[in-house]
Amino acid sequence: MDSDDLLDLSAYADEYWAILDLIDAAEKVAICGHTSPDGDALGSTLGLGLALRGRFPSKDITFLIADDAPAPRIYRFLAGADELVPAARYTADPDLFIAVDCPVLDRLADGEAVVRRADKVVCFDHHPAREEFADVVVRRPDAAAASVLIAEFLSFVNISIDAAVASSLLCGIVTDTGRFQYQNADPESFCVASMLVAAGADPARIALEVYQSQRLEYLKLESVVMSRIRLVADGRVAYSYARAVDLAEYGVSHDECDGLVDIVRSVMGVEVCLFLKELDNGKVRGNLRAKGALDVSGIAAAFNGGGHAAAAGFTYEGTIEDTLRDALPMLIELVDSVRDVEELACAPNEA
C-alpha cells in the first residue's frame, strides 16, 4: 500500500479549493489555535502561517495566540514562535481568519473577538463540534491532529512545505499522538509524518525540545504529582492533582503541566485517568486520558469540555475536592460498564 492509498486528499477537494480562493482574495489573514495551546494548536498555526507567507509574500499574515501570554516554553523553538501576537493585542479587521485545532468559538478565547471582526472564517479541526462557526470547514474527527489536515491541504493545493513548516506540523502530530503511542496513531499519521521528515522536519530536535528539556523545578513537581496518584475501581481508574501552591512553590507555569496527565496514565492496569490542576481563579483544569476503547469525551462534555475518545479536558468551577467528588463516580461508572460487558461476553451460554 502506497501513500496515495492512505491519503485520499480528494475527499475535501471542494473545501480545499474554496479555502485557497479565500486566501488568494484576502490581504490580511489571521491564524489562531485554541486557548492554552498545545503542540498541535501551535504547530498547525505556525506551519500553515509560514507556508502561506512563502506562497503569498505580499500578504499581511499574522500568527495569533489565543491568550495574552507567550507560547509555552517547550514550543518556542518552532520557527515563527517569536512572532506570535496575543489576539487581545491584534487590532486589525482581517479579511480572513483561519481557526486551527479549535471546535468552538469560546475555545479561541481572545481570538473570538477577532473572528467576529473578520470578513471570512475558515476552520481546520479534528475535534467533534456542536455547531460550526466558519464559512468553510475541514473537520475530520478521525484525523490524528489538525496538523495532519494542514499538511494534506498544503500538499493538495501545491503550496511548498519547507523544513520550518514541516517541523511545525510534525511537532503537532508527535504531541497529539503522544509520540505515536496513543490510539490515534493511525497509518495516515505515520504517512504524513514520513512526508514531513522527507521535507526537512527534524524529529530529533522536536523530541529534545518537547520531551527531553524539562527544568529541574518541573521534575520536582512531577515527583509530587506521582506521590499523589491514587487508584480506585480495582485499579482501573487513577487520579492525581497539583495545587496552585505547588506550582508557586516550585516555580512552574501552568503551560508546563501538560505532560503530567501522562504520568498518571502510565500506571499499569489503569484504563482511564484524571489529572487536575488548580488554577488561580477558583477553577480547576481537568485532563482525561483513556487506554483501549474507552471514551472519556462524554465525561468532559458533561462539564462543558470536550475532546476525543482517548483524550479530553474540561474546566470546573470549584475546588479539587469538588471536582473529584463529581468526576470520579462518572469514571468509575465508565469502567464498570465496560466490565459488565466483558463479563457478559465471557459468561457461558445457558441452555
Image (cartoon, helix red, strand yellow):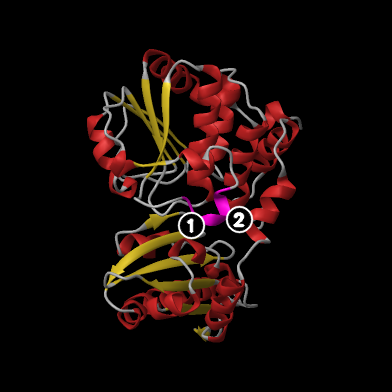
Q: Quadrant of residue 226?
A: bottom right
Q: What range of the chain is rendered magenta?
A: 71-76
Q: Is residue 157 left or right of residue 279?
A: right
Quadrant of res 322: bottom left
**Circle 1 sits on which residue?**
309
Judge whether residue 150 is colored magenta: no
For the C terminus, the image quarter is bottom right
- Horizontal and vertical percent for residue 162? 66, 28
Q: Residue 240 location in percent, x, y? A: 48, 79
In this orientation, which residue lies closer to the viewer: 246 or 145? 246
- For label 2, the residue is 183
Dot 2: few (<14), some (14–19), or many (≥20) neighbours within 10 Å?
A: some
Q: Residue at x 31, y 45 (%)?
A: 130
Q: CA distance from mark 2 to mark 1?
A: 9 Å
The amino acid type found where label 2 is placed reads Gln
Q: How many marks?
A: 2
**From where the camera sits, is residue 121 visible?**
yes
* SS under mark 1: loop
Neighbor class of circle 1 (other Cα within 10 Å; few <14, some 14-19, many 20+) is many
**251 and 196: which is toward the camera:** 251
Q: Residue at x 58, y 79 (%)?
A: 220
Q: Amino acid at mark 1?
A: Ala
